């Protein structure tokens, strides 16, 4: 086996003729002899066991009551504005319970603008859940861009005008890991009319004048 070095700010070339160098740009094998001095990129160290990228949600499933409130809010926004909307999800580790926060937002057919703000003391911000209005639930290019630097759970809920669909994932370091809805929720999605939303829920939702994802004539996209 050959030694492994980290290329930090104080790194100095070691005396070894062959060694591995871990850098910001990946892993390199360095060879130095009378003929040449070379650094070649390598995928891994052959004597170590293999590994793959993975991410798993460690929190308990989101209960049906929270899920029903989320869907009810999205339905209300859709019926009024025919637009997407978003909620923020938090978890209290001491009390082991979830709580929703509806941020002030500007909504459009295919996007919504909002600010996350500080996380309340004693709470863990789990992530975001947003709707796709009448479009299918999937993670769009806009979602990828919005969530690229936002580690956590990100859920999309779609088809609000029919049989509700859902897409779930964990985003870590810009990488998206798909989850099954059963890994996130303890019940199936449904359109519920028996949920009472917090008073004034729609008062912090405004229609965006010209959505950022609109075409040249100002028409929003469907996602």
Image (cartoon, rainbow, N blue to C red):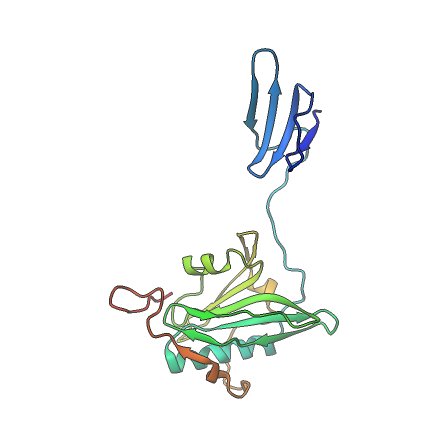
Counting from the top left corner in percent of width and height, residue 87 is at 53, 73
Which of the 4 image quadrants contains residue 209?
Answer: bottom left
Counting from the top left corner in percent of width and height, residue 194 is at 53, 86
Q: Is residue 157 above or below residue 43?
A: below
Camera-side residue of 9 and 172: 9
User: Residue pushed farthest right?
Assistant: 94
Camera-side residue of 141 and 29: 29
Q: Is residue 207 above or below residue 198?
A: above
- Residue at position x 36%, y 71% in the image: 109
User: Residue pushed farthest front?
Assistant: 10
Counting from the top left corner in percent of width and height, residue 82 is at 37, 77
Counting from the top left corner in percent of width and height, residue 17 is at 66, 18
Q: How many marks?
A: 0
- Residue at position x 45%, y 79% in the image: 205
- Residue at position x 57%, y 30% in the image: 42
Which of the 4 image quadrants contains residue 31?
Answer: top right
Quadrant occupied by the N terminus: top right
User: Residue pushed farthest left?
Assistant: 217
Camera sees residue 115: yes
Camera-side residue of 38 and 223: 38
Quadrant occupied by the C terminus: bottom left
- Residue at position x 24%, y 67% in the image: 217
Camera sees residue 186: no
């Amino acid at each position: 086996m050959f030694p492994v070095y980290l290329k930090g700010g104080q790194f100095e070339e070691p005396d070894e003729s062959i060694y591995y160098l871990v850098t910001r740009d990946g892993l390199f094998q360095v060879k130095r002899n009378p003929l040449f001095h070379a650094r070649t990129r390598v995928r891994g160290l052959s004597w170590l066991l293999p590994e793959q990228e993975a991410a798993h949600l460690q929190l308990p499933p989101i209960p049906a009551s929270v899920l029903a409130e989320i869907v009810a809010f999205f339905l209300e926004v859709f019926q009024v504005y025919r637009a997407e909307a978003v909620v923020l999800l938090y978890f209290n580790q001491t009390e082991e319970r979830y709580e929703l926060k509806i941020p002030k937002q500007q909504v459009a057919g295919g996007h919504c603008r909002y600010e996350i703000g500080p996380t309340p003391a004693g709470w863990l911000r789990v992530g975001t859940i947003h709707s796709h209005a009448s479009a299918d639930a999937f993670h769009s290019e806009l979602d990828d861009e919005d969530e690229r630097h936002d580690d956590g759970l990100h859920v999309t809920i779609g088809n609000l005008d029919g049989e509700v669909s859902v897409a779930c994932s964990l985003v870590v370091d810009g990488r998206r890991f798909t989850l099954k809805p059963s890994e996130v929720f303890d019940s199936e999605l449904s359109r519920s009319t028996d949920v009472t939303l917090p008073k004034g829920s729609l008062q912090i939702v405004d229609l965006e004048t010209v959505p950022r994802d609109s075409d040249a004539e100002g028409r929003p996209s469907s996602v």
